[in-house]
Image (cartoon, rainbow, N blue to C red):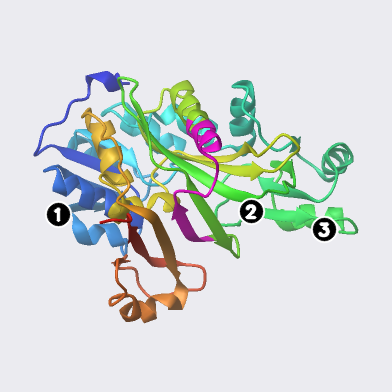
Amino acid sequence: MTDARQVKLKPGDTIGILGGGQLGRMLAMAAARLGLRCQMFSPDPDSPAFDVVLNATCAEYADVEALELFANDVDVITYEFENVPAAAAMVLDARRPVLPNRKILETTQDRLAEKDFVTRLGIGTATYADVTSVSSLREAIARIGLPAVLKTRRFGYDGKGQAIIRKGDDIAKVWTSLATKSAILEAFVPFEREISVIAARSAAGQVECFDVTENEHRDHILKISRAPAPIPDSLAEEARGVAGKIATALDYVGVLAVEMFVLANGTGPKVLVNEIAPRVHNSGHWTLDGASISQFEQHIRAIAGWPLGKPVRHGDVVTMTNLIGDEIKDYEKWLTVPGATVHIYGKGTPRPGRKMGHVTEVRPTKGE
C-alpha cells in the first residue's frame, strides 16, 4: 500500500477510475483539462464515462486478470462510487495507490460503522441502534421511539434499502420487506432543512470546503441544490468544521460529501450528520459552473498530489436542478434560460428515478 504523500502525477500521466457513470464521466473531463489521462473500469458496456476517454476496461469487478491489467496501465486509482467490492480494492491496492484509501470504505460502506465513527469524534447524529432480527427491531423501537427509519447497513442510496416505521405499522412485515439480516434503526429527525458540505483534503492535510449547500429531495432523490444554504454564518462555519474534522480523522485524500440535518431548538439551529459519501457528490454539481474550481477538479488535484484550489463562488445564488427520467426530453427549454448551463450525461433510455442530466443556474453578484 503506497503512501499517498508519495503520489505526484504530472501532465500526461493516467488516472484509473472505477465505475463508469456520470460522476466518472465528469472526473475524466476535469482531468483532461489538466492534461491528465483517464482510463475507466466498469462492467457496464453502456457506461456514459466510456464516451469521454480513449481507453476503458469493460469487465466484472471479480475479474482479477482484468483488474491487474487495468492497474498496470495507470498511475493512481480512484472511484466514483463507494460500493467498490473489497476484494477488487485489495487486488488494485497491491499494485497501484488507491485514493481515497480503500480502508475508508470499510467505514463508509457500513451505516452502523459510519455512525459509530462519527459518534466517536464527538459529532452529533440521530439516535440509532443495530438491528439483526424482528425481536431486536422491537427492542430498538422501544428505546428510540416512533417514527423511525429502518435502513440496510449496506448498499442503500436514493431512498433504496430503507423504510419509515410509524405507529400501527406491522413491524414483522417491515423487517421482512427490507430483505436483510443487517440493518440500523435511526430516530426520525424533525429537521428544518437538509444541507451538505463538499470538502476536499490533500495528502499533506490541506482541507478546502465549498459553500454549504441546501438540498431538496423529491421521492428520496436529490432534485435541487442551492448554494449558499440560507443559514447563519456561524452554522455554516460549524458545518464546514464538521466536514473537515471527518476528513482529517479518516486521513482522507480526495473529495467527500457530508450530508447533515439542520435542527431548530431552543438555543438556535444545530447540525446532525446524516451520511458520509466518500466521493464527489450530486449536491456538488453546482460547482462545475458556479465556482472557480469544481468538486471534480478538486478531487483530481488531491489524488494527483497537486495543491488544492481555494473555491470562490461566481454568484449570489447558484442552483442545480437534476433532470430525472423523462425530464431530460425537455432539455431544450433550458438552453435559452439566462445564466443556465445544461449537462446531459449521455445515458440511454430515460427511466423513472434515473438521473439523466442537470442544469446549473447562476445569479450574478449584484453590481456585476
Relative to residue 99, is residue 108 drawn left or right? Answer: right
SS at badge 2:
loop
The disc, 1 or 3, on the residue closer to the chain's N-terminal end is: 1
Q: Which residue is drawn at 58% across and 37% down?
A: 110
How far across and down, in percent of the image, does residue 340 sit?
Answer: 31, 67
Q: Which amino acid does label 2 sit on?
A: Gly
Highlighted range, magenta: 222-240
226 falls in the magenta region: yes
> Tag 1's secondary structure?
loop
* Depth check, front residue: 311 or 70: 311
Q: Residue 351 at what x, y percent from top left?
A: 47, 74
- Provide the secondary structure element on which disc 3 rests: helix
- Quick one: 345 or 239, which is closer to the camera? 239
Q: Distance between the residues labelled 1 and 3?
A: 49 Å
Residue 217, above or below 39: below
Q: Residue 161 carries which label?
A: 2
Is 292 situated above or below 323? above
Residue 54's mark? 1
The amino acid marked with disc number 3 is: Lys
Q: Do the residues labelled 1 and 3 touch (CB within 8 Å)?
A: no
User: Which image quarter holds the C terminus?
Assistant: bottom left
